[in-house]
Image: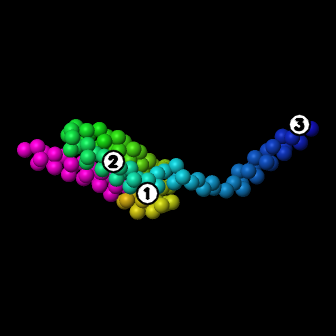
Amino acid sequence: MTICKTYIVLCSLILLCIFTSPVAAEVMDKEMSIPAIWAWSFFGAIVGFLLIRFRWWLGFLTLAISGFILSGAILEWNDPFVGPAIVAETGVNYSLYNYLAILFLITAHIVGWVRYYKHRK
């Protein structure tokens, strides 16, 4: 009986190795959607712009918090395994929209600081 069990296990392993199929893993179910990224960007930009009017250093706080949330996506795009899967699943536009959202966030903070210093004089 042991020879028969060994033979069955060996044949099963050989068939498993021969007839395996590649697994298609979903990557984007773990990533933020484009509307969610823009929502964080708008929220961080508006809150940062308004807080800079009261204290200039509060802009660094909102920029750090929003930037930390949005930078998680940048780290995953640059990953050698996850990055190509994201591009294959969503296309290049996904990363373009994310970079534009981060640029908008930074621009809103810069405009807030410029307005703060102009009104301070």
Segment tinted magenta in the rendering: 98-121
Residue at the image position 40 percent from the left and 63 percent from the top: 93
Q: Which mark is residue 44?
A: 2
- Residue 109 % position (x, y): 24, 48
Using the numbered discs, state the Cα–Cα distance from disc 1 to disc 2 in whole angstroms: 14 Å
Q: Is residue 15 magenta?
A: no
Q: Which residue is nearer to you in this view: 8 or 73?
A: 73
> Left or right: where does residue 18 sit relative to residue 40?
right
Secondary structure of the residue carrying numbered label 2: helix
- Residue 59 % position (x, y): 25, 42
Label 2: how many Cα within 10 Å (few below 14, some 14–19, many 20+): many
Q: Is residue 105 magenta?
A: yes
Q: Which mark is residue 35?
A: 1
Q: Nearer the viewer, mark 3 or mark 2?
A: 2
Three-letter residue code for mark 2: Gly
Residue at the image position 38 percent from the left and 47 percent from the top: 70
Q: Residue furthest right?
A: 1
Comes first in the chain, label 1 or label 2: 1
Residue under pointer 3: 2
Q: Which mark is residue 53?
A: none
Three-letter residue code for mark 1: Pro
Label 1: how many Cα within 10 Å (few below 14, some 14–19, many 20+): few
Secondary structure of the residue carrying numbered label 3: helix
Image quarter hosting the N terminus:
top right
Image quarter hosting the C terminus:
top left
Secondary structure of the residue carrying numbered label 1: helix
